[in-house]
Image (cartoon, coloured by chain):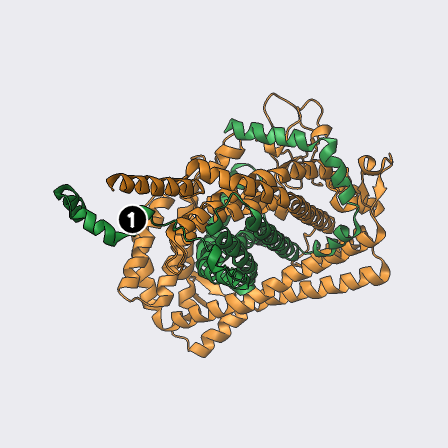
């Protein structure tokens, strides 16, 4: 069953809506669900259907449970443009710069002049926002709309993947990708992707897949393996300490029912252990237990949510506390579990806790065992890299079609291949989406630069016109009006003295 | 909050007019703009390129703005004479230093090593494997509640990596921008620029030749002291004449 992302116009009877209107976008049909080829409008918006083999869908679902600070960062990524750049720049100009001009101990200039100059900064910042930043907004909105409805050429055109099912079908059956460029060049027929772009797209899809596997190999060699070796070595001589500490913690955790309480309790334990100079590795183990309980359900609306979404984006996972507590108990059990099992690697029966595997072994033995425990994973990754590199070469030499490539993946699936479940066409779709979105973002940035640069002389002229007038009106003592005042004081003084005379 | 949405809607409708769409369409056909597509294949490189363009935009505007501000400040009769040169000098030193400092701050903060350390300092706890194990358990529970098949470990970790990468890219962009425009440009620069402006002002005045005035035509009028206050010797004699004036003199 293929993934189908249904565009608004395709669902008859359902009113037009988008993510921005606060309503979740609709996805229909995928491998793990009952077939569902149409959506019936019942007055309620149907719940979004998730494809759990799609990293894009799973990453989106992750947002519901990840911390708001990270979600905020992820959201910012989609909104990077010249408007934000000018806004940040103006914040610095308007709020920070005046402080360092006015109260600068290194300057020998009189305070009045410094204050006078300092006030130029907020005026300039306000003008930059009003003239340079605001003008970029309708341009950015226009780019978004034009990219979506195909008013640009292929580089900035999102019509190719507006209907993902059609995209996948065309790619698998015809080895083609089509753009709707009617609004760009007036041609009614769909426009085929340029052959050189298609070639680059397939090559880059391979490159990305290879890079992903290589990254994992690097993560294992740089982080996972050293971490596992250090932990294994620690277990060899400190198994009793680990068993005692974790057994005590487990007893206490049995009385705790919520993730929040568990986090507080374990955090307290970490602090107490650090204070009493407990072994670093033991502290790390307790920290790892604590970090399983970071979940913070979204029960209150964030400022972002209030500003940009009409419907509250709140989300609570049902039975989250039980799930988190189970994850913590499972981890403890994985380390010190007493239940016996047959260890195939060692050929003996032992308690299944990992600590018993290493207890009493020499450091060299522990290092070797840790390395061996990752051999299978590493071999799988290297096999995947070799397979992808070979397939990429074959694509170039033999001009394999996407369906040929997918058949190669399926053939490998039988051998428990790591990438057996990969849908190459979906990866091509993801690659094209990223490429087009990156092009649009670059275009937006260039447009923002051009427009704000063109507005600069106007900002400068306005500043020169406004700044002295603003100072005259608000701070006459600092501006030229001060001189009139000084002169009149002098005249008054002179007159008075004359009178005295 | 509904006002914010209303404003966005208006902006959207304004942008949808030919006044905005036509120039954008024309711009999308420019060759050198389209050549930038080579940076779009890799999302990390694309993001670095966009951040670099953002900083370049700020630097170009600062350079051009500096030229305009100095020129205009020097000719702006509305700014008092005694402050005009200082304002212009401050503009000039500011401009030069701002460009240098922004480039320096950007090069430092946007460096891969600095970025990974900064990001880890702020978010390491939430993205480390133990935390991800907790989130994975929750996601699986949530999917089970909704009758969705659980993603396999590879898909989960690839998704978590995608999620983390998006957050990392935004963090890299905004931290570079904040470092360049707020710290470099607005904290460090004014601190150095103001004393440098003193020196620049002096240099500007040095170039100006002093005007020699003939003794016969020299203006002896003192703007600072009134003529009545000048001859203190004479005044002192006068002051001694009455007790009231004596009192006044003492008060002074």
Question: Left or right of A211: which side holds B209?
Answer: left
Q: Would you name the residue on which mark 1 appears?
A: B229
Q: From the viewer's side, name the closer residue of A78 and B30.
A: B30
- Residue at the image point whose x is 64% and y is 33% from the top: A26
Image colour for chain B is green
Q: Secondary structure at mark 1?
A: helix
Question: Left or right of A217: which side holds B237?
Answer: left
Position of residue A304 measured from the top left corner of the image (x, y, whole percent): 49, 38
- Among all residues in the image, which is located at the extreme front? B216
Picture layout, residue A345 above or below residue A193: below
Position of residue A5 measured from the top left corner of the image (x, y, whole percent): 69, 37
Report in which chain the residue with disc 1 lies: B
- Within the image, what quadrant is residue B67 found in? bottom right
Position of residue A317 measured from the top left corner of the image (x, y, whole percent): 47, 39
Q: Is residue A135 visible?
A: yes
Picture layout, residue A304 above or below residue A366: above
- Residue at the image point whose x is 32% and y is 39% from the top: A492
Q: From the viewer's side, name the closer residue of B107 and A203.
A: B107
Tell me which chain appears orange.
A
Position of residue B78 measured from the top left corner of the image (x, y, whole percent): 52, 43
Q: Residues within 10 Å of mark 1 (few under 14, many from 20)?
A: some
Question: Left or right of A444: which side holds A70?
Answer: left
């Amino acid at each position: 069953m293929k993934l189908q992302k249904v565009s608004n116009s395709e669902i008859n009877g359902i009113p037009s809506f988008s993510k921005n209107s606060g309503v979740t976008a609709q996805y229909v049909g995928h491998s793990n669900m009952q077939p569902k080829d149409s959506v019936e409008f019942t007055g309620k918006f149907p719940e979004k259907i998730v494809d759990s083999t799609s990293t894009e869908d799973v990453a989106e679902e992750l947002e519901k449970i990840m911390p708001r600070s990270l979600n905020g960062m992820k959201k910012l990524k989609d909104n990077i443009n010249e408007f934000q750049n000018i806004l940040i720049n103006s914040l610095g100009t308007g709020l920070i710069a005046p402080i360092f001009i006015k109260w600068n101990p290194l300057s020998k200039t009189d305070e009045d002049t410094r204050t006078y100059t300092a006030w130029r900064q907020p005026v300039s910042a306000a003008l930059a926002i009003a003239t340079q930043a605001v003008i970029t907004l309708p341009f950015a909105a226009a780019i978004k709309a034009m990219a979506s409805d195909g008013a640009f050429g292929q580089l900035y055109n999102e019509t190719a993947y507006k209907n993902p099912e059609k995209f996948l079908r065309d790619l698998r059956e015809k080895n083609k990708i089509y753009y709707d460029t009617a609004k760009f060049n007036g041609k009614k027929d769909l426009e085929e992707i340029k052959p050189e772009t298609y070639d680059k797209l397939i090559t880059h899809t391979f490159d990305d897949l290879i890079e992903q596997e290589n990254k994992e190999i690097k993560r294992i060699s740089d982080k996972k393996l050293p971490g596992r070796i250090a932990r294994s070595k620690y277990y060899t001589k400190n198994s009793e300490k680990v068993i005692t500490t974790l057994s005590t913690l487990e007893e206490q955790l049995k009385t705790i029912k919520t993730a929040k309480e568990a986090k507080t309790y374990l955090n307290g334990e970490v602090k107490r252990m650090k204070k009493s100079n407990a072994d670093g590795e033991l502290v790390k183990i307790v920290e790892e237990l604590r970090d399983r309980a970071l979940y913070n359900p979204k029960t209150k609306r964030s400022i972002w949510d209030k500003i940009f979404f009409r419907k509250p984006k709140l989300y609570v996972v049902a039975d989250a506390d039980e799930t988190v507590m189970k994850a913590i108990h499972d981890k403890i059990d994985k380390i010190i579990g007493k239940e016996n099992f047959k260890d195939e690697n060692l050929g003996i029966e032992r308690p299944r806790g990992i600590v018993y595997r290493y207890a009493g072994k020499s450091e060299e033995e522990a290092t070797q065992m840790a390395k061996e425990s990752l051999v299978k994973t590493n071999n799988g990754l290297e096999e995947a890299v070799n397979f992808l590199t070979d397939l990429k070469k074959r694509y170039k030499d033999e001009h394999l079609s996407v369906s040929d490539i997918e058949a190669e993946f399926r053939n490998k699936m039988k051998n428990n291949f790591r990438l057996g479940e990969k849908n190459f066409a979906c990866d091509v779709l993801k690659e094209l989406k990223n490429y087009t979105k990156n092009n649009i973002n670059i275009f937006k940035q260039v447009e923002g630069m051009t427009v704000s640069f063109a507005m600069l002389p106007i900002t400068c002229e306005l500043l020169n016109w406004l700044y002295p007038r603003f100072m005259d009106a608000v701070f006459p003592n600092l501006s030229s009006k001060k001189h009139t005042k000084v002169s009149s004081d002098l005249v008054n003084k002179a007159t008075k003295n004359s009178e005295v005379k | 909050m509904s006002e914010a949405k209303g404003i966005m809607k208006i902006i959207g409708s304004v942008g949808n007019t030919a006044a905005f769409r036509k120039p954008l369409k024309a711009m999308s056909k420019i060759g050198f703009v389209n050549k930038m597509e080579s940076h779009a294949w890799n999302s990390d490189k694309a993001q670095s390129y966009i951040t670099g363009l953002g900083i370049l935009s700020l630097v170009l505007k600062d350079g051009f703005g500096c030229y305009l501000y100095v020129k205009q400040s020097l000719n702006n009769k509305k700014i008092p004479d005694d402050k005009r040169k200082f304002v212009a000098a401050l503009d000039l030193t500011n401009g030069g230093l701002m460009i240098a400092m922004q480039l320096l701050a950007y090069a430092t903060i946007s460096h891969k090593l600095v970025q990974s350390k900064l990001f880890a300092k702020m978010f390491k706890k939430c993205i480390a494997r133990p935390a991800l194990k907790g989130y994975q358990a929750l996601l699986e529970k949530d999917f089970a509640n909704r009758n969705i098949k659980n993603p396999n470990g590879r898909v989960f970790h690839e998704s978590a990596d995608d999620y983390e990468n998006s957050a990392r890219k935004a963090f890299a962009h905004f931290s570079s921008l904040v470092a360049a425009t707020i710290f470099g440009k607005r904290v460090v620069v004014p601190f150095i620029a103001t004393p440098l402006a003193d020196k620049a002002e002096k240099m500007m005045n040095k170039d100006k030749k002093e005007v020699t005035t003939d003794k016969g035509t020299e203006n002896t009028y003192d703007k600072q002291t009134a003529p009545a206050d000048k001859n203190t010797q004479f005044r002192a004699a006068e002051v001694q004449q009455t007790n009231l004036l004596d009192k006044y003199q003492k008060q002074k």
